Image (cartoon, helix red, strand yellow):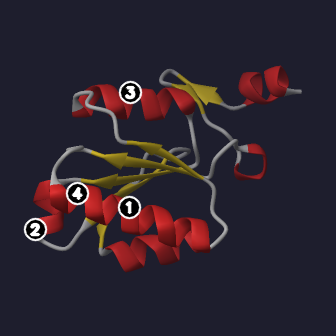
Amino acid sequence: LVGAIIEASHDDAGIVWPDAVAPFKVGLVNLKSGDAATDAASATLYGKLNDMGVTVLYDDTDERAGAKFSNMDLIGLPWQLVVGPRGLKSGIVELKRRATGEREELSPEAALAKIAG
C-alpha cells in the first residue's frame, strides 16, 4: 500500500503524502537550534500542535537551513512550519503546503489555525 501511495503521489523532491495517510501532519523546522528565541517559539508551537491533536515531526538538528528544507521535502509531510530568528523578530513564521509548494508568512497563531483547517 505504501508503495502505491508513493508511486501515485511524489515529485522530483520526494514523497508528497496525502493528509489522510501521512505519518505526521506537520514538519516543524527550527532554523537556529540553540537560539533561545527560536527554541522557545518552536517548543511552544510543538506543544500547541500536540494539544490540538496534530502529529508533528520536529527538526531541531544543527544542519544548515538548506539541508533541513531538503529533508522535509524528501519526507513529504503535508505542512512545513518554519521558525527562524529573522521571522520571529517580525512576529512571523513560514508555513509551506508541500503538495502545492505554496509558502505564506503568517503569525504563529494564524499558522496554527490554517493547519487545524
Q: Amino acid at mark 4?
A: Thr
Q: Position of residue 39 (x, y in %)?
A: 27, 56
Along the viewing direction, whichever of 51 and 65 lies nearer the viewer: 51
Nearest to N terminus: mark 3 or mark 1: 1
Report how far apart the C-alphas of labels 2 and 1 lie in the structure.
17 Å
- Residue 117 seen in render: no
The residue that disc 3 covers is 70
User: Mark 4 falls on what kind of element?
Assistant: helix
Q: Could you say which quadrant of the image residue 43 lies in?
A: bottom left
Report how far apart the C-alphas of labels 4 and 2 lie in the structure.
10 Å
Report how far apart the C-alphas of labels 4 and 1 lie in the structure.
8 Å
User: Mark 1 falls on what kind of element?
Assistant: helix
The residue that disc 1 covers is 43
User: Mark 3 falls on what kind of element?
Assistant: helix
The residue that disc 2 covers is 89
Q: Is residue 38 left or right of residue 71?
A: left
Split into 4 quadrants, where in the image is the C terminus? Answer: bottom right
Q: In the drawing, what numbered circle is on residue 19?
A: none
The residue that disc 4 covers is 38
Nearest to N terminus: mark 2 or mark 3: 3
